[in-house]
Amino acid sequence: MGSIAIFSVIISMSIFGIILYWGSILYSYIFSRQGRNLNSRDYYECGFKSVPDSRLPIDINFSAAGLIFLIYEMEIVLFVPIMLN
């Protein structure tokens, strides 16, 4: 395999990664929770304030982007040495 073929594979993987990145940004913008009433669970029906949840919330968009990035990096780590041989 020539160096031009390796270069084109690296460029196409980079373009694919950029498309995935901007796609996740667009997805999070379209399906954001703005405008919804998220404070509806602050009070019980009797009027007493509920106890806050002790668990820390996890941002799903950040987790999904991290998982996609991890898969992309593992793909590079596994396939680039194969292409170089």
Image (cartoon, grey):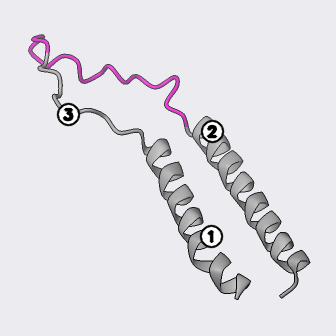
- What's the magenta bit mostly, secondary-structure-wise? loop
- Looking at the rendered structure, the kind of residue marked 2 is Ile
Pointer 3 local density, CA inside 10 Å: few below 14, some 14–19, many at least 20: few
Residue that badge 3 annotates? 55
Pointer 1 local density, CA inside 10 Å: few below 14, some 14–19, many at least 20: some
- Looking at the rendered structure, the kind of residue marked 1 is Ile
Picture disc at residue 37: none
Residue 49 picture quarter: top left
| Residue located 88% across and 84% down the image | 2
Question: In the rendered picture of this protein, how many numbered marks are placed on residues?
Answer: 3
Pointer 2 local density, CA inside 10 Å: few below 14, some 14–19, many at least 20: few
Write down the region rendered in magenta.
32-49
Give the x, y percent position of residue 30: 63, 39
Dot 2 or dot 3, earlier in sequence:
2
Picture disc at residue 30: 2
Relative to residue 26, is residue 11 drawn left or right?
right
| Residue located 90% across and 76% down the image | 4
- Looking at the rendered structure, the kind of residue marked 3 is Arg
Residue that badge 1 annotates? 76
Give the x, y percent position of residue 45: 13, 19
Q: Residue furthest front?
A: 85
Instruction: State whether residue 40 is above or below residue 19.
Output: above
| Residue located 17% across and 22% down the image | 52
Q: Quadrant of the N terminus?
A: bottom right
